[in-house]
Image (cartoon, rainbow, N blue to C red):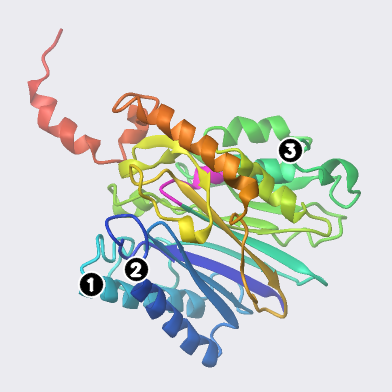
Amino acid sequence: MKTTVSVIKADVGGWPGHATVHPELMRTAEENLKKAVAAGVIKDFHVSHVGDDLELIMTHTKGEDSTEVHKLAWETFQKAADKAKELKLYGAGQDLLADAFSGNVKGLGPGSAEMAFTERKSDPVVVFMMDKTEPGAFNLPIFRIFADPFNTAGLVIDPSAHQGFVFEIWDIMEDKKVFLSAPEEMYDILALIGAKERYVIKRVYPKEGGPLPADEPVAVISTDKLYHVAGKYVGKDDPVAVVRAQSGLPALGEVLEPFAFPHLVSGWMRGSHNGPIMPVSVKDARCTRFDGPPRVAALGFQVANATLGMPVDLFDDPAFDRTRQQAEEIADYMRRHGPFEPHRLPMADMEYTTLPGVLERLKDRFEKV
């Protein structure tokens, strides 16, 4: 029976503003998931947060898109949102865009990344959690993990990883997907994923004939776009990802290495600005400066018999101090642009923010030149 790791997240109330998650919301979620373990709905769980997003990390044997597991997540977020309303937290219930549950959380507001796989003798799994950014923010690091030999030495010197991996890439504007193989189609992959606002990596698979089943993903990223659901800007998408490591896959250090570069991502203040993604510990995942800068946290688990065990806060390490300093310097530089591009997003991307409301007020004042 396959083990499933489900990471489902939602912003159900910020404390204060968009900074972080109130401890009472964490406690509410933990109590509800404890009951679910006792009832046999899930095997294990860990509740975490990054910025103002409540993160439910769960293991079970029910497979991806389980109605039972997704209903549990939905009800947990509802209870946390009720607590947020009681505490008058900002944006209480913000990501819960539907009135009722309808089979799974897809299209209802929360984001999810799920992976079902056959456990190996040892299965290290990393859960990445981002805040104040979009799913395309994972494009660069996931590409480097599974396709860049300058990042992942195993692609060159490990016979079990040398043949490369298959990327499942989604066109989130046209609701289409394509499978491309690295390294032989590397340039085609880059031609797409460099346009991160449209093309996003959804899954990565091993190749046929390798040491792992080719039909079981080794990386999964949430691709939920809130404005697609709500029809207007209600907050950034704040994606999550699940990545397996070691034994025919990139080593743990190779999985983390891309985040030593604070690459520019879209989101930050009001979802309308470009800024550096800063790798931080969970305790430092408070988005404060200009509601940011965008953050990424990473929790490592040693999955065994469909249980998570204790998490390791992987970016709680002085090895990433210089990256954080560099992110601060980039944040300084970008902020000095104020309302000008390239700090503010280009107009095509601003269509999905609150700016159209301003332009609507001015439309009748324009004259022909």
The amino acid marked with disc number 1 is: Leu
- Mark 1–mark 2 Cα distance, whole angstroms, equals 9 Å
Callout 2 crowding tier (Cα within 10 Å): few <14, some 14–19, many ≥20: many
The percent position of residue 303, horizontal first and vertical second, equals 70, 73
Helix, strand or loop status at disc 1: loop
Q: Quadrant of residue 118?
A: bottom right
Residue wearing tag 2:
22
Q: Is residue 155 above or below residue 43?
A: above
Q: Earlier in the sequence, mark 1 or mark 2?
A: 2
**136 sits left or right of 98 in the view:** right
Residue 181 in sight = no
Return the residue found at the far left.
Answer: 365
Query: Which numbered circle lies on residue 148?
Result: 3
Residue wearing tag 1:
87
The amino acid marked with disc number 2 is: His
Residue 257 in sight = yes
